[in-house]
Image (tube, grey):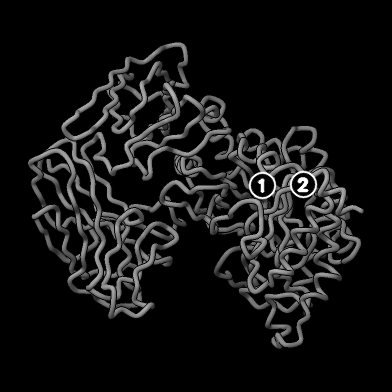
Amino acid sequence: MAAKTARQTRKSKNERMAWWREARFGMFIHWGIYAVPAGVWKGNRIAGIGEWIMNRAKIPVGEYEKLARKFNPVKFNADEWVRAAKNAGMKYIVITSKHHDGFAMYHSKCSKYNIVDATPFKRDPIKELARACKKAGVRLCFYYSQKQDWHEPDASGNRWDWPDDSKKNFDRYMDEKGLPQVREILTQYGPIGLIWYDTPQDIKPAQTRRFVKQVYKYQPNCLVDGRAGHNIGDYRSMGDNQIPPAVVKGDWETPATLNDTWGFKSYDHNWKSVGDLLRLLIGIVSKGGNYLLNVGPTAKGVIPAPSVQRLAAVGKWLKVNGEAIYGSKASPYPYELGWAAITTKPSKLYLHVLDWPGKEIVLYGLKNKVTKAYLLADRKKALSVTQEYDKAINLHTLRLRVPAKAPDKIASVIALEIKGAASMDQALLQQPNGAVILGSYNGQIREPAKGLKPRDRLVRGRFGAVENWTNTKASLSWEFKLAKPGAYNVVVLSSTDREGQWLAGHRVKVTVGRQAVKGALKDQGRTWNPKAPTSYSDVATKIGRVSLAKAGIHTVTFKPEKLVRGKAGELKLSSIRLVPAQ
């Protein structure tokens, strides 16, 4: 009867997704008894993310259980947590009800291994958080680790206590703990916005469907994230800290950290700056996604001050510019601009200017007539607009007269009211500062039709680079539209690996039209790749100069001539840039 009622009352997907598409920005909270060791076990710092300490240090269940006796978050204040999220401009909170360590952060009736029964705290923080969220108008959502549970012999992940996988019975785990606990969190805390499953690993399709149906059975309008498994869910979840290099169709979300961990680690102080957080928020939303930004409270129940301070600064920016984020859609450009990002609404285009040029802003490619332009920080003052069209090269140019000084030191937003739906030139265009940015993600891969084994084929990596350059027969090419003829330095950007290592010495050739430049890759400067975790950087190498005498369409081809080998791995190409020669 319950399932029948759910089918009758369940809204269409568009109706159910509406609040989530409007929200764009949410708070992830990773909190559990792993906050007690805070990254340290028996005097040793344990590498990796804080909530994985049981796994990384191979802590036996009997020893790890003792952490619960030390977990007493007496400083926990649900209203303060929700206030921090709301002050940041976040619209929903996703908190770990049970992570991979198997410890329930709410009062579970089907397992005594929970915060009420196993700790001196004896309170249900989720119940308090539910009340605070309801009062503040913030949606409460739950993370639940459906496949990994290191506390249980029938679940996945713990092979140091239970090494024999053949003895595991995951269906039994689902029936005795997994599904009952999901039912509990869906029935004890009021309306829930979504259930955030994680690490499906080798879960079977039928098992995934049971976990998903459990959600819809008890809360028909609750959403399910894409990590349920087998592409069963309401939206796609990107990899941790993964920022797509370009617009992604459909509904998706990036879960991301404020530093390098999810669960609290006492010695992780690698906090992202407010500028980085805003650029990431803008970048994700401009590509059509939601930003789920994590905080890792301490064992005392306190969200670290650096997190709260940075979130408050992001919220201050959103109070001025939130119109360009909440409920907005992706950029009509098929690539990143570099100096700015774009979000859209019906008959409106928002230009998030990250590198303020002063006095004049130029945007290439917009075909719509602009009827009005103004800064969100100063809506009453209209900006002067000039639009031009060069028929010879089919190039639309928009010019805006703007203040010499940026209204915001990180990102200033200009609203453009336009006639009709946004229509943009889909060609790769030279940027207003003269640079040409050719991202690997939108280059044309060219490889021999025969003679290459599957393992030698090029692949587009998670963070935008083209990887697996194991042979010199493959190449990457682009066509772009040049507006300003002149001399250009050719710069190759290649990526480090996840440990920050990079291998010099690859010899490459870049052909621009009929001109070719060659050189060996060497480290001439590094910049953090914002599409990847903080451990990844792009390494720049200037390999030569070309002269482009005519405006219009030009072709660029990248090809390695000699590849070196080393422990840092193969060449990973991020982009080619043509930079105006001084």
The residue identified by callout 2 is 76
Residue type at tag 1: Ile
Vertical relation: 520 (above or below) 20: below
- Number of residues whose C-alpha sits closer than 10 Å to that of mark 1, classed few (under 14), some (14–19) or many (20 or more): many
The residue identified by callout 1 is 303
- Number of residues whose C-alpha sits closer than 10 Å to that of mark 2, classed few (under 14), some (14–19) or many (20 or more): some
Give SS at disc 1. loop
Vertical relation: 567 (above or below) 76: below
Residue drawn at the location 28% of the way across and 80% of the way down: 451
- The image position of residue 282, as x and y in percent, is 47, 39
Residue drawn at the location 78% of the way across and 52% of the way down: 216
- The image position of residue 260, as x and y in percent, is 53, 57
For marks 2 and 1, give the CA distance.
9 Å
Asked if residue 450 lies left or right of residue 200, the reply is left
Q: Identify which residue, 225 or 427, lies in the foreground.
A: 427
- The image position of residue 278, as x and y in percent, is 48, 39
Q: Identify which residue, 196 or 82, lies in the foreground.
A: 196
Asked if residue 440 lies left or right of residue 135, the reply is left
Vertical relation: 221 (above or below) 534: above
Mark nearer the N terminus (2 vs 1): 2
* Tally of numbered discs: 2
Q: Quadrant of the C terminus?
A: top left
